[in-house]
Image (spheres, rainbow, N blue to C red):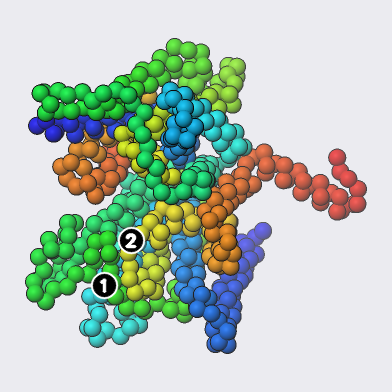
Amino acid sequence: MMSFFSYLLNGISLGAVYAIIALGYTMVYGIAKMLNFAHGDILMLGAYTAFIAFNSLGLPIPASALLAVIVCTLTGILTERIAYKPLRGANSLAVLITAIGVSYLLQNLALLIFGANPKSFQSFIPIKPLHLAGGALTIPGETIATILTGLIVAAGLLLFVHRTKAGQAMLAVSEDKGAATLMGVNVNATIAMTFAIGSALAAVAGILLCSAYPSLTPTTGAMPGIKAFVAAVLGGIGSIPGAFLGGVILGILENLSKAYISSKLSDAIVFSVLILVLLVKPSGILGKKITEKV
Amino acid sequence: MNGNGRRKKIFQSDMASYAMILAAYLAAELFLRSGAAGSLFKGLLVPLCIYSIMALSLNLVVGISGELSLGHAGFMCIGAFSSASFSMLMKGQGLPNGLCLFLAIVIGALSAAVFGFLIGIPVLRLKGDYLAIVTLAFGEIIKNLINALYFGVDERGAHFSLKDGAALKLAGGGRIIIKGAQGITGTPKLSNFTVGIILLLLSLFLVLRLMNSRTGRAIAAVRDNRIAAESIGLDAARLKLLAFTISAAIAGAAGVLYAHNLSSLQALPKNFGYNQSIMILVFVVLGGIGNMRGSVIAAVLLTLLPELLRSLNDYRMLIYAVVLILMMLFTSSPSFLSFRRELLLRLRGRGKDGREVS
């Protein structure tokens, strides 16, 4: 029974990481109407930056984390400016292929710079593990920190989007770019801001992910990135609470199927969820059903 | 242009594509016969055919139906493993080689088509970029599954297991065909350059015929404007599904060629992984989306170049990534397109009357 709780908690923690990545995915998708394939690789970049800052430059943990966030934010804005912005108004296939190119570029740059050997990432979480039920249940500090961070990030984003002017501008742009322009919203700046926030979140997710699963390689971000997309679709793409919910459900599902069904097939199970969702309710759990007007 | 003129132009262009492949085939054969060809060159001939077929197959999805598949290596993997299992079963049964390969190709193409069809049903109904992510996931799942799969036969029939070889519980005379991560060993080497070229020509014929048929034009209409196409009664989901299934079948056939070109077959990230799918996408993008001849040329060039420029090997994938981004910016960016148009107009204006047009 205790092992079940332990799997469940690990699942929620992994789910919280997926949720943080999915939040970035879903915001960018909602605003730029594009699948930012490179999102997972921005995560990897954040983890490498934190690793280098901490291990090679000897910076303290908060400074290393901050540096990772800054580097990712700048990379996010830069890729948007160079690769995606010129393609605004082009067909979606072109944007998608460009995003894949950016993702592939980041992965292979990391491969050239850092090599293919996994780096062992030292945990950034100073919280001590919690022993419950007379030592039968141990909750690692990373789990606690990840779940808390996930909650804070989701709540903060909700507040930001609904309570601030910049957040309202984001909503307006995602609803109707043309109308938002007419209302005096700076669409380009809003999209750049969305990429910045999404990439900063990816850096946080990267540090949390690598603190819990310490092996860091150039493809570290690829799988979590795809799974976070599945989470975003599951929760309803474009919806902030949906991305959080989807992430947590997916994390739990993955960890429980790893524990009770098969570790080799857990990925297959997660992806069959995606296909199932697309079959049954393509708009996701909390997504709005959009009827298209002709 | 009137209908007849257009048809004639398409016919000429198609014939030029076939002629190009035949000429390349003859040249390569002559080079081989002359005895000057090294083993590196000989070893590249069948892969060249495989990659060209894969590029055609992906271009059918990307170019004609306007969707993106990132799991084409997965279909190739299915074609490879299903057909290699078949020819392992047929080993020593007295089946002539040619017939065995023919049946293997049919089986490989059909099994890949079945998977393509099954994936396409839920995904292609939807608008948006779902196919890309689902096929990407699919490619990874197939690789994982095959690495975990054990398959053997004995007199009681076929046995499958996802655990290990012992779990198959084979009777005395039984043999294991797929050995988990070790894959299949001892596949008969039935592929050769001529078979590869025949398969390439067949795939090209299939794709070009489809492209210029009523169905192909309907698929392209759905790509260009789904709403308009549906409003004149075209079934968008069915048409996209058709294109995707045919494409999967062609990729499966390429997989058959791959499996029967090597004596051992394993599902590695290198041959059936994401990188392979991206490489095929690079062929398609560089050759021109929707341009079948371009796909073949790009596949051949990009397969030969790295072999000639070994020193660039470390940077190859980096270059691929840059190629993807730049090609898209140059061919699809609205501002770059209008800049290009303007430049062209200016150049033309200057050419005509020898003075600058403002």
Label 1 secondary element: helix
| Mark 1 touches mark 2? (CB < 8 Å) | no
Label 2 sits on residue = B267
Residue B110 on image: x %, y % = 32, 65
Residue A219 against residue A78 in the figure, above or below: below
Number of numbered labels in the structure image:
2
Q: Is residue A80 at all visible to an observer of this figure?
A: no
How many residues crowd mark 2 within 10 Å: few (<14), some (14–19), many (20+)?
A: many
Residue B208 on image: x %, y % = 51, 65
Q: Which mark's residue is nearer the viewer, 1 or 2?
A: 2
Mark 1 vs mark 2, CA separation in Å = 17 Å
Q: Residue at x 59, y 26 (%)?
A: A188
Q: Residue at x 30, y 51 (%)?
A: B141
Side (left or right) of B278 relative to A141: right
- In the orientation shown, which residue stands out farthest toward the bottom? B34
- Give me the chain letter of mark 2: B
Q: Quadrant of residue B142?
A: bottom left
Q: Quadrant of the N terminus of chain A?
A: top left
Side (left or right) of A86 relative to A63: right
Q: Nearer the viewer, residue B269 or A293?
A: B269
- Give me the chain letter of mark 1: B
Q: Nearer the viewer, residue A195 or B128?
A: A195
Q: Residue at x 12, y 61 (%)?
A: B167
Q: Amino acid at mark 1?
A: Phe
Label 1 sits on residue = B86
| Disc 1 and disc 2 on one polypeptide chain | yes
Label 2 secondary element: loop
Residue B76 on image: x %, y % = 38, 62
Q: Quadrant of residue B4?
A: bottom right
Q: Amino acid at mark 2?
A: Ala
